[in-house]
């Protein structure tokens, strides 16, 4: 019988193949080719990753830019609304201030008359002809048969808790005819009497006297009580 050793044959063949592969790999050209392929693969991989990461960063930046634009638009709307509200508040404040000034202007002459009424009631025998108010300056004109009455009235204005300041009183005596007495041939001087005409200039300061006791310069409830024959006229320039 013939015996064939197949194991040795396979081993020998395999060993030869390995040697052939080693020879091919060990050659300089093959090594250069494999290194070139590896470098090329790494380069492509790095470039691809760089492109992908750049695209992702660009998309993220664009998303953030859109968010910032949206926030800026919302902020612009809020600022516009705030500006409109500020303009409305300013307009309302201006209206309130105008109303206050109008009320103060309307209450001014009435308050002056009320202040005069309070003081005239304390000095009987005083007759007013006119009261004129120009800003803070009040001019009072009238007469009285008794000069002491004029002096007493001036003092009531001077000591008014700051309501009237910087008083200037001018007086002038005048002889007038009493309308209730008719002169005759026997007594031509009948009915003649001396009166004291006065003019008082003063500064009207209701704000300074607002807290003074017994005074309420900004409120008036009645017209001044004076002689019906000599009505009071109030003029405001």
Image: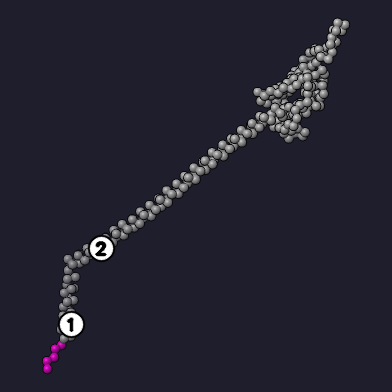
Residue 234 visible, this angle: yes
2 vs 1, front mark: 2
> In this rendering, is residue 150 above or below 42?
above
Residue at the image point whose x is 68% and y is 23% from the top: 235
Q: Furthest-left residue in view?
A: 2
Instruction: Please state the horizontal and vertical placement of residue 56, each as a whole percent of the image.
Output: 35, 57
Q: Which mark is residue 41?
A: 2
Provide the residue span drawn in magenta: 1-5
Magenta: main secondary structure equals loop
Tell me if residue 208 can be seen: no
Q: Which quadrant would the C terminus be assigned to in this image? A: top right
Is 22 positioned to the left or the right of 97 in the image? left
Expressed as whole percent of the image width and height from the top left, the position of residue 203 reads 70, 25
Residue 204 place in picture, x, y as percent: 70, 27
Q: Nearer the viewer, residue 123 or 6?
A: 123
Q: Quadrant of the N terminus?
A: bottom left
- Residue linked to disc 1: 11
Colour scheme used in the picture?
Answer: one colour
In this picture, is 32 found above or below 232?
below
Q: Nearer the viewer, residue 186 or 52?
A: 186
Spot the residue most to the right: 186
Residue at far bottom of view: 1
Q: Whole-Å distance between the Cαs marked 2 and 1? A: 36 Å
Tell me, yes or no, whether the highlighted magenta stretch contains residue 4. yes
Q: Residue at x 33, y 55 (%)?
A: 55
Q: Is residue 217 magenta?
A: no
Q: Residues within 10 Å of mark 1 (few under 14, many from 20)?
A: few
Q: Is residue 67 left or right of residue 171?
A: left
Asked whether, in this view, residue 161 is left or right of residue 75, the answer is right
Q: Secondary structure at mark 2?
A: helix
Numbered disc 1: secondary structure: helix
């Amino acid at each position: 019988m013939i015996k064939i050793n197949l194991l040795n044959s396979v081993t020998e063949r395999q060993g030869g193949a390995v040697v052939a592969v080693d020879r091919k790999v060990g050659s300089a050209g093959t090594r250069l080719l494999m290194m070139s392929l590896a470098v090329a693969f790494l380069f492509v991989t790095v470039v691809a990753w760089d492109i992908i990461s750049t695209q992702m960063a660009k998309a993220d930046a664009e998303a953030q830019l859109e968010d910032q634009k949206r926030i800026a638009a919302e902020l612009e709307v809020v600022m516009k609304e705030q500006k409109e509200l500020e303009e409305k508040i300013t307009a309302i404040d201006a209206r309130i201030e105008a109303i206050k000034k109008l009320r103060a202007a309307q209450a001014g002459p009435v308050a002056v008359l009320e202040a005069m009424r309070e003081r005239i009631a304390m000095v009987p025998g005083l007759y007013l002809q006119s009261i004129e108010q120009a800003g803070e300056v009040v001019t009072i004109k009238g007469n009285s048969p008794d000069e002491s009455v004029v002096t007493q009235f001036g003092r009531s204005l001077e000591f008014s808790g700051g309501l009237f300041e910087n008083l200037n009183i001018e007086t002038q005596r005048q002889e007038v005819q009493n309308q209730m007495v008719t002169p005759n041939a026997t007594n031509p001087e009948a009915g003649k009497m001396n009166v004291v005409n006065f003019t008082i200039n003063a500064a009207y300061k209701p704000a300074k006297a607002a807290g003074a006791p017994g005074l309420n310069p900004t409120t008036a409830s009645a017209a001044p009580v004076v002689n019906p024959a000599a009505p009071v006229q109030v003029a405001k320039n």
